[in-house]
Image (spheres, rainbow, N blue to C red):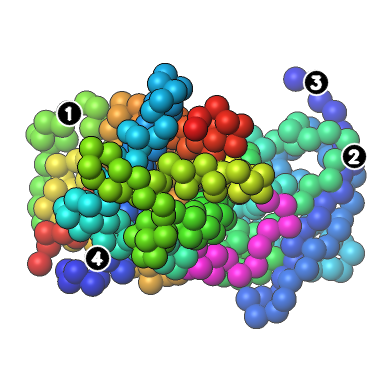
Amino acid sequence: MEHYTMNLTLKVWRQKNSQEKGRFETYQVKNISSEMSFLEMFDVLNEELIREGKEPIAFDHDCREGICGMCSMYINGKPHGPWHANTTCQLHMRAYKDGDTIVVEPWRANAFPVVKDLVVDRSSFDRIIQAGGYISVNTGNAVDANAIPIEKDKADNAFAAAACIGCGACVAACKNSSAMLFLSAKVSHLALLPQGGPERKSRVLNMVAQMDREGFGACTNTGACEAVCPKEISITNIARLNAEYIGAGLVVE
Amino acid sequence: MQWSEFFTSSVGKKFVMGLTGLFLISFLVIHVGINATIFADLVDPDENGAMFNKAAHFMGSTVLIRILEIGLFAGIILHIVQGYMLEAKNRSARSVGYAVNLGNRGSKWYSRAMGLLGTIILLFLIIHMAHFWVKARITHTLAPVTYNGVEMHDMFSEMKAVFSEGWVIAVYVLGCISLGYHLAHGFQSAFRTVGVHNNKYNSLLVNLGYGFSILVSLLFALMPIAMYFGWVG
């Protein structure tokens, strides 16, 4: 692809802290390379802001390889920007052309309070995982990986669910701010495997209870979560979660 | 886990929505099936709604069906109240909205408008019940008609009278369109909500849902239209 440079107008959400009311600030960025990543473009803008003695824009990022789930940004109305199955860090500026205006907002959900600018607190996800997103194994020698036979389809579906990086794009895109795609990926991942069997019922009940405590909305199966998920987590997982929850909730005493 | 815990959880509340939704879908099958007997007039001009009147009489005079009617009301009320409670809770989960919305890039508009569509259906239901149900079951102000020595309500004539005004037809068509879109999402969503997670069945249910929504809303809408234009009756 041919290299080109562009000048852009950025409308970025600025918010000092979780208490203060935020607002949009408009910035002009010049000579942005089409080969830069979206976050590198923000790095360039921040360098400039620092040179001018202004507060740089706070945003989350870590691996910049699309696997850690740290980056967020609601870009022109879509989590992680315009590309399908992509994270913000893997979004490149060739997605834009000279003169474009880009609106960048933080994830919006009461369960994800804004910490600063584009950074939101996603520790509610951590607490959902702590409520049951694990298996309990007695320590000792590691068991041979092939000792437990697992049906190929189930292993594949479990693996696909385990690809969830917990970025929260599903919550950001959902009109209900529901965390069901995230939760269903975590529950499906373990419910499909024999290792997840012993805690299968308590896991789903505890994780849903924690999700509700965190203030996420309920799922209405609109499919917006699946459409924006950088890891293409299937909405079928939500139906599986429902089955797991109903199956456990109606029998556990 | 207590029953109350299950039914007050987000998944439990949705389970109730899904179950009542499926129950109401089964009611629609009966309702549209019985009402479609008005079209018997198309093949037999002497029919004059006899089949429909007899069917309506059977529904109103059979004890078991009257008991089921109580269940139907309970189901409708539960679906409405729970629906509004969920809508309120879901809306309150995001206090600060977006400047630019995802909109139709992520989902179908009618899947996001279930509350609005449901509200239109509710308003339609109030008018619809005032037109027929109240007269048939509460005030008994329908003209009588006798078939084989059995006196019953002439519901067919009442339909013709009600569907003689243009605004009524407009209200009914709007109600049917809203019902069609509500079902287009609700049918397949209800199955997912109660836990159907087999992709083979889910894709079948999506298409079945579209077919059902179009068929039911079209048949219902054709009833007032056919009577207004005098195709039937």
Q: Is residue A215 above or below residue A194?
A: below
Where does the C terminus of chain A fall, quadrant-wise?
Answer: bottom left
Q: Which residue is mark 4?
A: B6
Output the chain of dot 3.
A
Crowding at dot 3, Cα within 10 Å, few <14 / some 14-19 / many 20+, comes out as: few
Look at label 3 and name its amino acid: Glu
Coordinates of residue B92 in the picture (x, y in percent): 54, 69
Secondary structure at badge 2 equals loop
Using residue B19 as the reference point, say whether residue A70 is left or right of it.
right
Discs 2/4, front: 4
Mark 4: secondary structure: helix
Q: Which residue is nearer to you in this view: A20 or A139?
A: A20
> What are the residue bounds of the magenta stretch?
B87-102
Where does label 3 land, which residue? A2
Q: Nearer the viewer, mark 3 or mark 4?
A: 4
Camera-side residue of B130 and B158: B158
Residue A126 placement (x, y as % from top left): 40, 63
**Secondary element at tag 1:** loop
| Residue hosting label 2 | A99
Instruction: Say which quadrant the N terminus of chain A sits in.
Output: top right
Establish whether labels 4 and 1 are both on one chain.
Answer: no
Which residue is under mark 1? A151
Q: CA distance from mark 2 to mark 3?
A: 18 Å
Discs 2 and 3 share one subunit: yes
Q: Where in the figure is residue A67, as x and y percent of width and height?
A: 49, 43
In the image, which disc is placed on residue A127?
A: none
Q: Name the image quarter holding residue B20.
A: bottom left
